[in-house]
Every structure is written in C-alpha cells, then in structure tokens.
Amino acid sequence: MALTGIQILKMLPKKNCGECDVPTCLAFAMKVAAGQADIGDCPYVSDEVKEKVGEASAPPIRTVSLGSGENVFKTGGETCLYRHEKRFEHPTGFAVLIATDMPEEDISGRLERFNSLRYERVGLILKADLIALKDATGDAGAFTGLIQRTREKCPDAPLILMSENPENLKAGAQACGEHKPLLYAATEENADQMADVAKDTGCPVAVRGETIGRTAQISEKLIGAGIKDMVLDTGARTVKAVFEDQVVMRRVAIKHRHKPLGFPSICFPCEMTQDPLAEALISSILVAKYAGILVLSDLRGETLFPLLLERLNIFTDPQRPMVVQEDIYPINGPDEKSPVLITCNFSLTYFIVSGEVEGSKVPSWLLIKDTEGLSVLTAWAAGKFSADLIGAFVKKSGIEDKVSHRNLIIPGYLASIKGELEEELPDWKIQIGPREASHLPAYLRDWQPEG
Ligand code: SF4
C-alpha cells in the first residue's frame, strides 16, 4: 500500500537542510509519495526506512535497467494509464534483431545501420536503443562470437540475448562482462534454471508465456525465487492479442497493483508480419499502448524516423515545456556587422528559427530570451516576452559588445511592441521580422542595418 507524504515525513530527520535538492523535508516527502523523488536522495535516512518507504513508494511497474555506465537503457517505472494524468517515464526501446543464422551482409548491415541511423531533433539525438541477438542454431560458439562482434562494433548498444538454451545465455552474459544484457527467455519449462542463471549473472530476465495468465504464473514463480528484474512477453503474436495484453497488463499493474504483471513488456513486431510497413504500423500502435521494448526485424530510415518522432511526442512530459538556455547563439560565423534576431526559448521555436537562419547562410546572432518554454505569442500574452523584459535582457546579454550596429529584429507577431521596445532600448532600432520562420532566409538576405 502506498504511503502518503505525511506518513513519509514522519520517518524523515526533519533537518530541512536541502541536501536532497528539495528545500524542505515536507516537500521532499511529497515528492517521494508522488514517485518524483527517491527516498535514497536524503543522506540521513536509515536503511530500514529506505526499505520500508522504497517498497511502498515503488512504481507499480518496476524499472528495469540494461547495459552499463553511460549506456544504460531503462524501461518501466510507469505510474499511470494515460499520459495526461502525469507523464510516461521511460520511452519504448527500439531493438533490431540479429540472428546467428543470418547471411553476413545482413548482420553487418544491421550493425552499421544501428550506428548510422541517428537523427537530431530539438537538441536530442533520436536513434534505435538496443540490439537483440538470437541464438538461432543452438551453437554456443557462434552465439558468443556474435555477441563479442556486436560489443566491438556497437559498444554503446545494450543487448538482449535470445536463446532456448539457458547455458548459452549464461555463457553469453559472461561474455558481456559488466555490461548487463536482458536474457530472453524464462519459460514454463526452464524457469528454475533461468532463475539460477539470472542470479549467477545478475542480469534481468525476460519471461515468455503462452498466454497472459501463464506469463503471470512464471513471473510469480521467479519472484518467489528472488528474481526482481523482469520483462514480460505474453506470447501474443497478432495485433489484436498483443494490444489486448498490453492494455490488460498495464491496467492490472496500475489499478490493482498485481505484482506478477508489474513489469515492463517486450513485444515482437518482427514476428508478427513479413511486411516492413505493417511492422512499422504495429510498432506505432504499441509505442502508444505501453510496450517497454519493441524488437524490429531491421532498421530502415523511412520507418524508424517516424517511430522515433511518435515516441518523442508520447514520452515528452506534458507538464514541462521543452526549453533551450537563455543565451546569444552565433549562427554561420557572425561578426560585428551581422544582424541580431531575438525569439523565445521554447525549444521548437528555437530549432525552427535557428534552422531557417542556418539555411539562409547569412551570418547572424540569435538572442534567446527565457520565456519559461512558452512560444512567442503565448509568452507575450503571459507577460513573459514584454518590451521591458526584452529590453532588460538585451542590455545584460552582452550583445552590445559583439556588434557595432544597434538593430534588433523582433518576431513579426510582436510588431505591436515596437514603440515600447524603442523606449526601453533608446540606442537601438527595432526592426520587424517576418511572422513565419520560413520567410527568414529571404528577409535576412535582403537585410540592411538602419541608422
Ligand atoms: S536531505 Fe533529508 S533532512 Fe535534508 S531536507 Fe532533504 S529530506 Fe530533509
């Protein structure tokens, strides 16, 4: 049963020292109760309290980590059914399947595409996350060889090791050293043996059942054997069945705290169709409906990129606008005669505007004013992008030391504050830029300083 903030507060030392990065013990207790902070962030609580609170405040779907160091992939940790209730915590991981019986060019092509298919978007690098290595022939040597080759070619890729033979999985996990792979899979037949392998190697284990009910039975058995980190595959391989299972698993874990199903899921679109577009379509459904990991048959830019964008949209925290830092951003190597533009710090605005300025090839200075992530008009309406605030920011930004002219280009939508801004910045000429960022290249190419 979850503890309330007040119940957690009673167990804290009440020093109000702020060492947990929260100003008071009460605020910290509320955050722990809401699942937004870890009780271990307070250095003064006893191990007994950590265990008691940690257990009670743990998310209903366990967080499972794969990989090592900076390349850890986390899945699970979810606390709600719908994103608007709070947020989804860990984005669905995309894995590419490589099997030991694939032709050489298929293996090397997948490894190469895992490294090369990376896209920058709003300051983030979007890419596939994991590689699933399948022991297709039962040959332990070939399996371990593929693992070692993958570790060399793609050292930052967390791995999923797939084999019907627990001994091969154990040898594969040992070949990974400190880099913890997910071991796929514990079944009704080998659950005891897989529990031993998971304990010996310290790796998380995937459970595969014939149905959702039988998956829960295996998971319950492994919980009884002391295994904590699991990922669940209900065995469903049709869209309807896998969709139903994902929804049922999430509901019973969140609404009823049913522990055997309180783990992230792994789904196999690669085993549900031969058609790459149908595979992408199935994957897009499962990104929206709760898949922890999706194993794809291959990585293709034309289907991977839309899936990555969908994932970015769904797993962006709806309560926190994405922002960039308030600063002066030089674009295309500007000098003292280059134009100066200003806009807000909503990251989408920044990346659209900076992209257009960069595309214009005109050396420019872009001032980014902190508007708490609001877009231009919303920020202006909320009083966060008003003439007095812009004026104060321009003065303190240091742009006056970088340019010899005094011309400031403001977004076309803010034309109405031109007069006020000229009062705030009497040395500057205020120029009205275009309303749409797409018109910036033409505007900048024709730009002339005034005065
Ligand atoms: S570190 Fe501990 S004692 Fe200090 S404010 Fe946070 S919860 Fe309170």
Image (cartoon, rainbow, N blue to C red):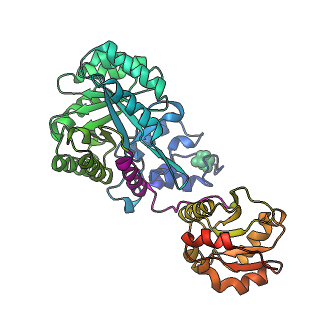
Please state which of residues 68 and 416 is positioned toward the viewer in this rendering: 416
Q: Quadrant of the C terminus?
A: bottom right
Give the residue at x 84% y 63%: 401
Question: Residue 19 location, x and y as percent?
Answer: 64, 46
As drawn, 14 above or below 130? below
Quadrant of the rendered image containing residue 109: top left
As drawn, 29 above or below 373? above
As drawn, 364 above or below 288? below
Spot the residue most to the top. 141
Magenta stretch in the rendered image: 301-326
As drawn, 333 above or below 217? below
Q: Is residue 248 left or right of residue 33?
A: left
Decide if residue 1 is in sight here: no
Residue 126 belongs to magenta span: no
Question: Residue 10 location, x and y as percent?
Answer: 51, 50
The mark total stands at: 0
Give the residue at x 47% y 29%: 154
Please state which of residues 438 and 153 is positioned toward the viewer in this rendering: 438
Please state which of residues 4 and 275 is positioned toward the viewer in this rendering: 275
Give the residue at x 58% y 73%: 376
Please state which of residues 84 and 307 is positioned toward the viewer in this rendering: 307
Q: Is residue 213 left or right of residue 288?
A: left
Question: Residue 161 location, x and y as percent?
Answer: 33, 26
Decide if residue 428 is in sight here: yes
Q: Is residue 246 left or right of residue 343?
A: left
Question: Residue 27 location, x and y as percent?
Answer: 55, 56
Quadrant of the rendered image containing residue 312: bottom left
Residue 319 belongs to magenta span: yes
